[in-house]
Image (tube, rainbow, N blue to C red):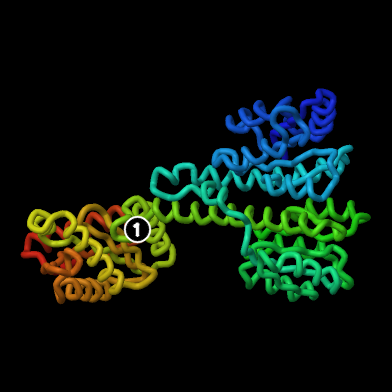
Amino acid sequence: MSARILVVDDVPANLKLLEVRLAAEYFEVILASNGAQALEICARGQCDIVLLDVMMPDMDGFEVARRIKSNPATHHIPVIMVTALDQPADRVKGLEAGADDFLTKPVDDVALVARVRSLARLKMATDEMRMRVATSRQIGVSDPAVEAINDQGLNGRVLVVEDHAVTAERIAAALSRQHTVAIAADPQEALFRAAEGKFDLLMVSIDLKHYDGLRLVGQIRSLERTRYMPILLIADTDQKARLLRGLDLGANDYLLRSADKNEMVARVRTQVRRRRFTERLRDNVQQSMELAVTDALTGLYNRRYMESHADSLVERAAARGKPLSVLMVDIDHFKTINDTYGHNAGDDVLREFSDRLRSCIRGIDLACRHGGEEFVVVMPDTDLGVANKVAERIRRRIAGEPFPIERGSRSVEVTISVGLAGRIGPQDSCALIMKRADSALYRAKRNGRNRVVSDAA
């Protein structure tokens, strides 16, 4: 796994030292000697992680981190602060500025590589989702980064897996003012609760009395429901090797038992913010996918989705030797509705029609807006006899009650014409079935509309 690491330090010797260490692990290294250069490189999207010295002239590391994290274009870039400052207050100040982690000078090689690798994995996963939502703003989906910048990481749900009662009570006391904290002393109970509950963060002691905390980390990462849940390890100062192993297994951060309370609070808020950001990205992807395959006005699938999915349904029916039927539905005299009452009324009719159509078909049936006032329903495991009954039910449902328009102040009579065709043999394609259904629809309209005509008739 390679990544582009931006090292920012005003001391040339420090730049060279970190460059050599990271290059030896096959990372691509970019150098900057001041904060302004660093911000320009980040803005151009030329780095995956920032290793940022705190003590610099003109603009210190705290301010650089704050600017990186306040910019929607660079908010997602992980920042590791490298500093000779070892006071808890300095670490808290960095975390509150937006830093994702801290390394103290002189930098330990093993800790450096472990931290960078862990954050590089996170950055790669985040980038993949960000690529998928790159066009979201163009289709009306909000930008997750804008919301993430304003998120303070408060009111999270935290599950603490710790069987040392004193440590568990100390953690709960420190976090309970800002978060809802649950304690689990039994790791198997914790695994169940993590899978069933909607937690924003899992804090795991790696020094459980009767269970390996790192094994629990592996189990959490292997379950679909908890795969992306942030994990913060709790350990003693002499457990560095196990901490690094935990980061390799997928833990996001660690906290020493001796850590200052304020540092604990800051690290938890960082993880809660990160969790919410990634959740927003996933929700954004899901929303974008739904917008890409559904018709915005009616909520039915659009023609593009129908053309790709209907073929699969026909192929599956052929492979299993099962029947399949297609309904082509057209709203009668729809242009007249638009011309008489206006296009807003026409939209009201389309929405109401779609609701009534959905109420008459099964969940496994594929209902799509084919274009304008024309709709298609693909019905798996349905022969022509049953499909004809369904089509008649839809026709009666549409014609049986006037459609409300103009927010219910008026109503209009609506009828439909339906053409029906079914799969004939193993070589019958979706295109051929649709063509026969369209021909049947044409006959229904030619013969007076408000009727169902089967291709077999």
Residue 164 or 329: which is nearer the viewer?
164
Q: Which residue is mark 1?
A: 301
Residue 435 or 127: which is nearer the viewer?
127
Amino acid tagged 1 = Tyr
Horizontal relation, residue 249 to residue 123: left or right: right
At which x and y percent is residue 161? 77, 69
At which x and y percent is residue 334? 13, 58
In the image, what residue occupies the spot 78% across and 72% down? 187
In the image, what residue occupies the spot 63% across and 54% down? 273
Q: Is residue 118 above or below residue 224?
A: above
Horizontal relation, residue 234 to residue 141: left or right: right
At which x and y percent is residue 123? 65, 44
Please indicate, yes or no, whether residue 457 appears anywhere in the rendered image. Answer: no
Total numbered circles: 1
**SS at badge 1:** loop
In the image, what residue occupies the spot 39% across and 69% down? 364
Residue 452 or 256: which is nearer the viewer?
256
Please indicate, yes or no, whether residue 214 appears anywhere in the rendered image. Answer: yes
